[in-house]
Image (cartoon, rainbow, N blue to C red):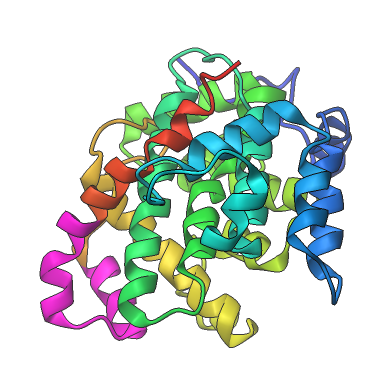
Amino acid sequence: MNPAPSAARPAPSLEQIGKLLDALPTLPLVALRLQELMNARRSSVQQVAELLSIDPSLSAKLLRLVNSAYFGIPGGVTDIARAVPFVGFNTIYQLVLTVSVLETLNIPGVGSFDPRHLWLHSLAVGATARVIGEEIGYADPGSLFTAGLLHDMGKIAQAKLIPEGLIAVQAVMARDGVTATVAETEVGLLGHDRIGTELARRWRLPAALVVPIECHHTIRRPEVRDRLPSNHRTATEVVAVADLIARDIVAGVDRTIGPAPEDVAAQALLDTLGVSAAARAQLYSKAAAQLERSRPFLQVLDAK
């Protein structure tokens, strides 16, 4: 069996992928307007609450998340205006982006591809990235969670736009025991990191999310590391090592990530980030516990 796309139907080029991406639904207007509000010098809790009230379904899902064990707000809150002082403007914005992307890219399975398995892996990456961020004193660990959760959204876009290509990639991975990146190259499919990056830019996601999506597989290359600002470099390194560690936390769930990597790759990134040996010993258990607290994010996919 030849899993590669046939000669009669070559893999789409970047230009063709761009046209396919144009056909995807855009993020809700509320998400884009909230980004503008967040970039304004002055914004109030009331302004944020009024904006979110335009979309009652989104507001309900946000309340479900902020009242979950992930945040642990004492007594819970009944409206977004009360939630903002507890979690902050940035967190509300990250939640809006997360819910919006999850809903926009929510699709049924394709062949042996199960999107919920990919989201579970991505959730584990986000949970692990947050734990590492807290360990190294990163200014906004919540943004690392969001970056980890969305780092592989290009795979969902592949499944939505070019399902035959994703099926071919999975066939090569199963046959040869290689990673998705290697299989994508073998079948001539544009990489999920490039597709995810293009989509993130079209959706005007902030650079703090776009850069980890684009570079989480290449950050160990000096030419990539050296061109990134320090904050984006650190965030991408955190997501990259979280991606490796998460494969052990939820081993065998996501068939699109390939075989478990050698431990040396994770250790090298942890060295770069300055994570101590003592902290590493507890990293897996802390990340697994954080994953359990984060599971309400997957419930967003089931909410109507």
User: Which residue is nearer to you in this view: 146 or 255?
Assistant: 146
Image quadrant holding the C terminus, namely top right
Q: Quadrant of residue 166?
A: top right
Q: Is residue 31 left or right of residue 245?
A: right
Evaluate whether residue 8 shows in this view: yes
Which residue lies at the image location 78% right of the left edge and 55% below the top edge?
Answer: 46
Residue plotted at (56% across, 48% down): 150
Q: In the rendered view, would you say 212 is above or below 71?
A: below
Residue 109 horizontal/vertical position (percent): 52, 15
Quadrant in the picture for the N terminus: top left
Position above or below: 21 against 288: above
Magenta residues?
A: 264-286
Picture quadrant where residue 163 is located: top right
- Which residue: 61% across, 19% down? 107
* 203 to the left or right of 97: right
Q: Is residue 189 visible?
A: no
Residue 28: percent from left, percent from top:
81, 36
Q: Kindly indicate the quadrant of the structure image that contains residue 241.
A: bottom left
Q: Nearer the viewer, residue 212 or 65?
A: 65
Query: Relative to the observer, which residue lies in front, 159 or 85?
Result: 85
| Image spot of residue 44 (x, y percent) | 78, 64
- Magenta stretch containing residue 208, yes or no? no
Residue at x-position 33% and y-position 34% = 176
Main secondary-structure element of the magenta-colored stretch: helix
